[in-house]
Image: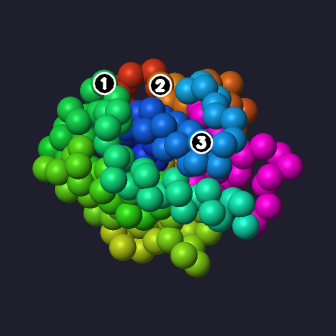
């Protein structure tokens, strides 16, 4: 950690608790079609692979056709984009952590599987006074995590070596992304997945509080 010049963060479940807004938006899209809705806790298992997979998992299995998924996703985006920050909040200690990292000279970036417009809107809304070198979400033609494409793009933009980079996330997908990119990984236990998933994915370190990310800097 003392050799860290760049920290790349996942967004949902790592910097921000977004599950309430995601759940409401997806249930609204399902309700428009008279389909069964899901409890808050179920959405913790649905998220992590982008909106398309979230919608697919939320739909009843017999209705998971490409057409139904695309239509439901469109309804989700229409509702969610305008109400993206109704229930969403930063996790405890996150704003203070980001400010302190910047004060210590560590560069910051975000790599998320959330659609680009939503990713940028949330980062701008909740961290307006914090400089990020890059804020990357899901974009057409760019593969989602655990493909390392977003991390590679950030490394190119910043010019920082991968051995001086850490990826921080709450899911096995994030840990696998770090491994694929050849950077160190830190799993956070406060997000949408449990500690076992982070351990099984091979996280280099797991932390339970935001301030623990500073302990070895």
Q: Could you say where residue 131 lies in the image, as x and y percent from the top left?
A: 20, 56
- Quadrant where the N terminus lies? top left
Q: Residue 15: which numbered mark, if any? A: none
Q: Could you say where residue 126 lies in the image, as x and y percent from the top left?
A: 24, 44
Task: Select label 2 or label 3 by which is in front.
Answer: 3
**Separation of disc 1 and disc 2 at Cα?**
10 Å
Which residue carries the number 3 mark?
A: 31
Task: Select label 1 or label 3 by which is in front.
Answer: 3
Horizontal arrangement in the rendering, residue 211 relative to residue 205 (left or right): left
Figure colour scheme? rainbow
Comparing 190 with 44, the one in front is 44
Which residue carries the number 1 mark?
A: 92
Q: Could you say where residue 56 lies in the image, as x and y percent from the top left?
A: 71, 51
* Overall secondary structure of the magenta section: helix
Q: Residue 190: which numbered mark, if any? A: 2
Range of residues picked out in magenta: 43-66
**Separation of disc 1 and disc 3 at Cα?**
33 Å
Q: Secondary structure at mark 1?
A: loop
N-terminal of the pair, mark 1 or mark 2, is 1
Q: Could you say where residue 72 lies in the image, as x and y percent from the top left?
A: 62, 56
Tell me if label 1 and label 3 are in contact, CB under 8 Å. Answer: no
Is 186 located above or below residue 190 in the figure?
A: below
Residue 26 magenta-highlighted: no
Name the outermost residue toward the bottom: 141
Horizontal arrangement in the rendering, residue 13 relative to residue 33 (left or right): left
Q: Secondary structure at mark 2?
A: loop
């Amino acid at each position: 950690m003392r050799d860290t010049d760049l920290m790349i963060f996942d967004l949902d479940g790592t910097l921000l608790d977004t599950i309430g807004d995601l759940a409401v938006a997806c249930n609204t899209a399902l309700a428009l079609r008279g389909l069964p809705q899901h409890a808050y806790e179920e959405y913790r298992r649905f998220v992590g692979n982008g909106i398309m997979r979230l919608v697919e998992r939320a739909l009843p299995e017999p209705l998971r056709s490409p057409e139904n998924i695309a239509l439901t996703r469109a309804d989700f985006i229409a509702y969610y984009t305008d109400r993206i920050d109704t229930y969403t909040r930063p996790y405890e200690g996150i704003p203070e952590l980001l400010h302190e990292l910047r004060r210590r000279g560590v560069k910051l970036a975000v790599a998320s599987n959330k659609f680009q417009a939503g990713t940028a809107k949330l980062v701008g809304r909740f961290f307006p006074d914090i400089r990020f070198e890059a804020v990357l979400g899901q974009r057409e033609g760019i593969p989602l995590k655990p493909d390392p494409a977003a991390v590679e793009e950030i490394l190119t933009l910043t010019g920082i070596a991968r051995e001086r980079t850490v990826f921080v996330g709450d899911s096995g997908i994030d840990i696998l992304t770090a491994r694929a990119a050849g950077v160190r990984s830190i799993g956070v236990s406060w997000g949408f997945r449990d500690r076992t998933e982070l351990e099984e994915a091979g996280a280099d370190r797991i932390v339970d509080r935001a301030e623990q990310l500073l302990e070895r800097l």
